[in-house]
């Protein structure tokens, strides 16, 4: 009897160790990823929060000491300069406009190619081009196309649309349209964002539309719903969850966006968004501490934005 | 009980109304149907123009001499007499022979991108498998850690990395860039592959275990082979990110021209007045073409891998 008991307990022990082995192996397999993410992402993030509270100039970067005394001077400097608020305002307007445009265009494009037709797979692939092409190349193409001297857009505008003079799309801070003052360069940058990132929304909405069961729409058709009603009350509500996710993702990425604005306008003509401002603090003013302080403020604003958004979503969810 | 038939009696109404819709010529429904039917093609055409014209313009300018562009900037074709490939010769040949040195940049970009793919897969595949199959401590928290790191602007982590890499002598080297690209892409890579590993039936893996394979053996002999499509698309995704990246290349490599990537090279040179726009357009084509070829060759694979989780809604 006792020998039978020992074999059972041995089996249990063996089983447990197998599970433990799996757990240990899991951690081992995960550790290279954890290591590189901790060293290259998490640790720098924490360190830069620390730098935000220290005096650090670009010239001293060789001797940067994580244990140098803490100070709030950077935050005072950044907050009092006034540049922070103007760059945050620009960033918010830019983010709102770009995200709205990109997601709306994505919805329209996804609905347009929903039903199968000849050449659909080519159209689908073509629509994704702006998103997969290198950002340096597409910004250079846009800059050339919008060039006031020889760019094709201004040539076309003057020859066909009857513009009196070329429009400096990327270097004019304030323009006029039908007598109303408009921020030309900022609007151009938003248009660029809409062009470049609608494919991202398009891609995910296409996948969702393809997986959507058709019986509800067929039933609505039988009940005499018009195409608009069918979209408004049947398709759109089913797309809303994924649109919500897309808005959050695009808001985070656009808010933190650096490449596009930097390459299009360099932050000139009223397009100095926060990340470009941080880059200037870092490389032109050579003040590493102030750059880190502004990044921290910026991240806090983003976190507040997202928290507010989540709160609204939850309220709506409760009401519904 | 008596209410039930009353409800049923209301139901046939739409069926009675349906034929009358067909008789009246301009109902809301018909107008809308016609509008959306035509509108759909207009929308597709407009989008195609908006998407393709910039790329057409890029190729067009890259095969023209700069004089032809300045003479007739509104032309959207290239005449056979103007057609030239000298722009490509100029942009690709080394600085020593009077060109812009893009061959070297291509080599740098290629090395960085391929190495990033290799490294991201090497550490991402085991990671993805662990998250999909092995119950280790902190398994759930790992994903939120990855997600949280995406909340912060890249430039925020660039500042300490700049300091850190300067200290350890990695700044200005392509190796440092490879580490950054790997760290940036590995969380998404793991997410993409994890979904696929989860679809591999557990019974297949258990059969392998019973037949005497170790867990690692199962991963190597069974799971990786079955997950190959997902691994391919993940690799392509990492390649594209690494090939296109700009900010870190700018911060780490800007003062060493011999290690510039194509993206950095084009952005640095496009600011100068001496280099003709047409030559830079040839540079743009050189930068864009590898990505577009990769993309069109593998489009289905790639988009399927990225949106695998989206169907659930």
Image (cartoon, coloured by chain):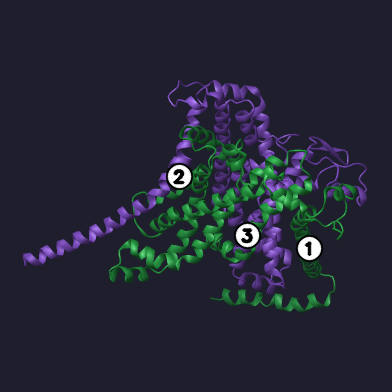
Chain colours: A purple, B green
Q: Are marks 3 and 2 on the same chain?
A: yes
**Is residue A94 shown left or right of residue B204?**
right
Indicate the chain on which mark 3 is placed. A
Q: Is residue A229 visible?
A: no
Q: Is residue A64 visible?
A: yes
**Mark 3 = which residue?**
A203
Residue A231 percent location from the top left of the image: 69, 63
Q: Position of residue B251 (x, y in %)?
A: 59, 37
Q: Is residue A40 above or below residue B20?
A: above
Residue at the disc numbered 2:
A37
What separation in Å lies between label 1 and label 2 (alpha carbons)? 44 Å
Residue A240 vs residue B182, the one in the foreground = B182
Q: Which residue is mark 1?
A: B45
Of residues A80 and B222, the one drawn nearer to the viewer in this rendering: B222
* Figure quadrant of residue A199: bottom right
Mark earlier in primary sequence (3, 2) = 2
């Amino acid at each position: 009897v006792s020998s039978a008991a020992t074999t059972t307990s041995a089996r249990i022990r063996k089983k447990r160790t197998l599970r433990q082995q799996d757990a240990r192996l899991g951690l081992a397999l995960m550790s290279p990823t954890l290591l590189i993410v901790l060293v290259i992402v998490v640790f720098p993030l924490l360190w830069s929060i620390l730098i935000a509270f220290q005096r650090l100039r670009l010239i001293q970067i060789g001797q940067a000491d994580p244990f140098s005394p803490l100070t709030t001077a950077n935050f005072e400097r950044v907050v009092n300069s006034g540049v922070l608020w103007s760059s945050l305002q620009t960033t918010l307007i830019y983010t709102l406009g770009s995200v709205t445009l990109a997601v709306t265009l994505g919805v329209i494009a996804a609905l347009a190619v929903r039903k199968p037709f000849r050449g659909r797979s080519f159209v689908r692939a073509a629509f994704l081009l702006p998103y997969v092409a290198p950002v340096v190349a597409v910004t250079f193409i846009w800059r050339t196309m919008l060039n006031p001297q020889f760019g094709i857009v201004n040539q076309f505008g003057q020859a066909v649309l009857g513009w009196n003079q070329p429009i400096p799309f990327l270097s004019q801070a304030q323009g006029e349209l039908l007598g109303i003052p408009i921020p030309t360069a900022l609007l151009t940058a938003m248009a660029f964002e809409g062009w470049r990132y609608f494919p991202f929304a398009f891609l995910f909405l296409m996948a969702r539309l393809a997986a959507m069961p058709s019986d509800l729409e067929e039933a609505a058709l039988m009940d005499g719903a018009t195409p608009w009603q069918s979209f408004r009350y049947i398709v759109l509500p089913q797309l809303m969850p994924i649109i919500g996710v897309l808005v959050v993702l695009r808001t985070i990425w656009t808010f933190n966006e650096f490449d596009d604005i930097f390459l299009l306008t360099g932050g000139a003509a009223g397009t100095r968004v926060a990340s470009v401002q941080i880059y200037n603090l870092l490389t032109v003013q050579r003040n590493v501490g102030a750059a880190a302080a502004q990044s921290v403020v910026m991240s806090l604003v983003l976190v507040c934005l997202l928290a507010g958004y989540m709160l609204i979503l939850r309220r709506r969810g409760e009401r519904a | 009980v008596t209410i039930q038939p009353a409800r049923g009696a209301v139901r046939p109404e739409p069926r009675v109304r349906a034929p009358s819709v067909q008789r009246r010529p301009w109902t809301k429904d018909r107008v809308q149907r016609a509008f959306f039917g035509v509108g759909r093609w207009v929308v597709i055409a407009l989008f195609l123009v908006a998407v393709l014209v910039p790329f057409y313009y890029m190729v067009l300018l890259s095969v023209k001499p700069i004089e032809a562009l300045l003479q007739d900037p509104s032309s959207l074709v290239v005449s056979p007499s103007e057609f030239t490939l000298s722009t490509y010769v100029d942009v690709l040949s080394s600085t020593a022979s009077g060109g812009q040195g893009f061959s070297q940049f291509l080599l740098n970009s290629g090395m960085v991108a391929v190495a990033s793919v290799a490294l991201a897969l090497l550490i991402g595949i085991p990671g993805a498998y662990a998250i999909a199959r092995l119950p280790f401590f902190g398994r759930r928290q790992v994903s939120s850690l990855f997600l949280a790191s995406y909340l912060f602007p890249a430039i925020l982590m660039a500042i300490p990395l700049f300091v850190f890499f300067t200290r350890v002598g990695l700044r200005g080297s392509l190796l440092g860039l490879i580490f950054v690209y790997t760290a940036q892409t590995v969380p998404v890579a793991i997410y993409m592959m994890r979904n696929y590993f989860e679809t591999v039936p557990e019974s297949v893996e258990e059969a392998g275990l019973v037949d005497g394979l170790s867990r690692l053996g199962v991963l190597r002999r069974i799971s990786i082979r079955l997950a190959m499509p997902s691994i391919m698309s993940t690799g392509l995704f990492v390649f594209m990110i690494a090939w296109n990246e700009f900010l870190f290349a700018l911060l780490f490599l800007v003062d060493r021209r011999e290690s510039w990537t194509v993206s950095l090279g084009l952005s640095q040179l496009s600011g100068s007045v001496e280099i003709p726009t047409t030559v830079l357009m040839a540079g743009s084509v050189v930068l864009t073409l590898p990505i577009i070829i990769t993309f069109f060759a593998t489009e289905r694979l790639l988009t399927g891998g990225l949106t695998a989780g989206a169907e659930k809604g």
